[in-house]
Image (cartoon, helix red, strand yellow):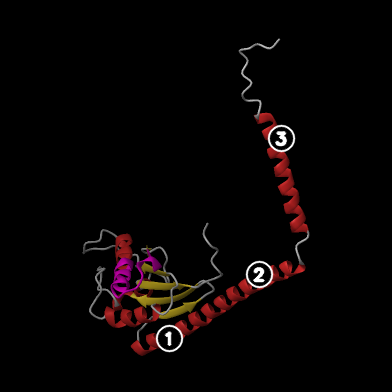
Amino acid sequence: MKDPREDLSALWMVPYADLMTTLVILFLALFAYSYANKPPEFEVAVAKMQQEVASRTSARITENRAREAELALKLKEEMDRLALKDFGINISAHYVRIVLPSPVLFSEGSAILGSEAGRILRPLAELFAQVENPILVEGHTDNLPIVRGIHRNNWELSAARAFSIIDFFVRRGMNPARFQARGLSEYRPAASNETPEGRGRNRRIEISLAREIQEEEPRP
């Protein structure tokens, strides 16, 4: 005889669970059937969409390549017009890089832009504003120690000069999120520090426009 105190109120869950399991199996079977018997037009439509996406990606990269090449040409023409000494433009798979001698932008030991700096940086800002690529500004020095000024060493000086140039561009309306600054001191020399000429080449600013290598993957 059953214990009259036994609770039988939960027995309804047994047939309910069986019913839910049966329904899940039914829906899985229907889904598998519909997927296996989808019309050929579905496959064609998916393939066409993939081709269109690939085509748009290729077209965008090609367009960016053409814009970067045009910008490099305009930068070269602008530097020639300014008749700067010891400047350079280098183009690689990753960057369009402009090399500017520090003396045309800063006085010795200073990170404050000189009176002639605007004449050089303004046209660069106008050209950089035509694209959206990230920009890296690097400050370089020679190996001579700093003997006067507010900066304790060449690390501080090179970094402060890079920030000064970025501040100039931002004040002219460029997006601050595009910029990175590096102060590399004397440790990336372009020439030997054993001669005055070599040290002069090492005192420089490099402004690099990052080229778009491939379509950026969407962030999750």
Q: For the residue labelled by badge 2, is the local secondary structure a helix, a strand or a loop?
A: helix
The circle on residue 74 is 1
Q: Which residue is mark 2?
A: 50
Residue 207 vs residue 103, the one in the foreground: 207
Q: Residue at x 26, y 81 (%)?
A: 116
* Disc on res. 18: 3
Q: Earlier in the sequence, mark 3 or mark 1?
A: 3
Q: CA distance from mark 1 to mark 2?
A: 36 Å
Q: Nearer the viewer, residue 210 or 82?
A: 210
Q: Amino acid at mark 3?
A: Asp
Residue type marked 2: Gln
Mark 3–mark 1 Cα distance, whole angstroms, equals: 75 Å
Q: Could one spot residue 47 in this view of the protein?
A: yes
Q: Quadrant of the N terminus?
A: top right
- Disc 3 crowd rating (10 Å Cα; few below 14, some 14-19, many 20+) is few
Q: Nearer the viewer, mark 3 or mark 1?
A: 3
**Viewer-closest of 155 and 66:** 66
- Res. 144 in view: no
- Above or below residue 14? Residue 21 is below
Is 147 located above or below residue 6 in the figure?
below
Residue 118, image x, y percentages: 27, 80
Residue 165 in percent (x, y) is at 31, 71
Q: Are marks 3 and 2 in contact (CB under 8 Å)?
A: no
